[in-house]
Image (spheres, helix red, strand yellow):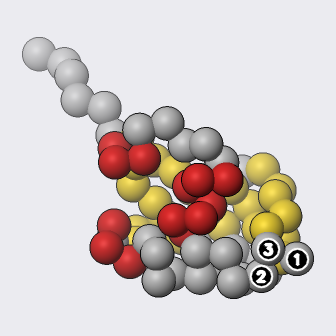
Amino acid sequence: MAKIIVNGKNQEINENCSLLELIKTNNVLQPEMVSIQLNEEFVNRENYESTLLKDGDAVDFLYFMGGGQ
């Protein structure tokens, strides 16, 4: 098991968990609308499946909302 931080909260994951798996296990709503920062660096959507998480990583799911006038 690896310990990571997801949106500021501690979480344990299986070794070799990808960002795509993390999205699924966290039941992220509208995954096509989420951007991910890994250790404060944005990850390209096409790399979610190949990006593996390791102990101590910090992940943030970010939703960009449009609006305003």
Residue 40 visible in the picture: no
Mark 2: amino acid = Glu
**Front residue (pair 11, 26):** 26
Circle 2 residue: 15
In the rendered view, does 68 fall on the left or right side of 50?
left
Label 3, residues with CA under 10 Å away: few <14, some 14-19, many ≥20: some
Identified at 67% across, 53% down, the residue is: 25
Q: Report the number of discs.
A: 3
Element under label 2? loop
Q: Quadrant of the N terminus?
A: bottom right
From what the image shows, is residue 38 above or below residue 36?
below
Is residue 64 visible to the viewer in this orientation of the structure?
Answer: yes
* Nearer the observer, 54 or 56: 54
Q: Are marks 2 and 1 in contact (CB under 8 Å)?
A: yes
Quadrant where the image shows the C terminus: top left
Circles 2 and 3, Cβ within 8 Å, touching? The answer is yes
Q: Is residue 46 above or below residue 12?
A: below
Q: Position of residue 2 (x, y in %)?
A: 83, 76
Q: Quadrant of the rendered structure where residue 12 is?
A: bottom right
Question: For residue 42, which quarter of the picture?
Answer: bottom left
Residue at (39% x, 55% y) in the render: 35
Q: Which mark is residue 17?
A: none
Q: Are marks 1 and 3 in contact (CB under 8 Å)?
A: yes
For the residue pair 46 and 10, the one nearer the viewer reads as 46
Query: Which residue is label 1 attached to?
Result: 1
Give how far apart the Cα atoms at labels 2 and 3 are.
4 Å
How many neighbours does mark 2 have within 10 angstroms: few (below 14), some (14-19), or many (20 or more)? few
Residue 33 on image: x %, y %: 34, 44
Q: Residues within 10 Å of mark 1 (few under 14, many from 20)?
A: few
Q: Position of residue 5 (x, y in %)?
A: 74, 61
Q: Which residue is mark 3?
A: 14
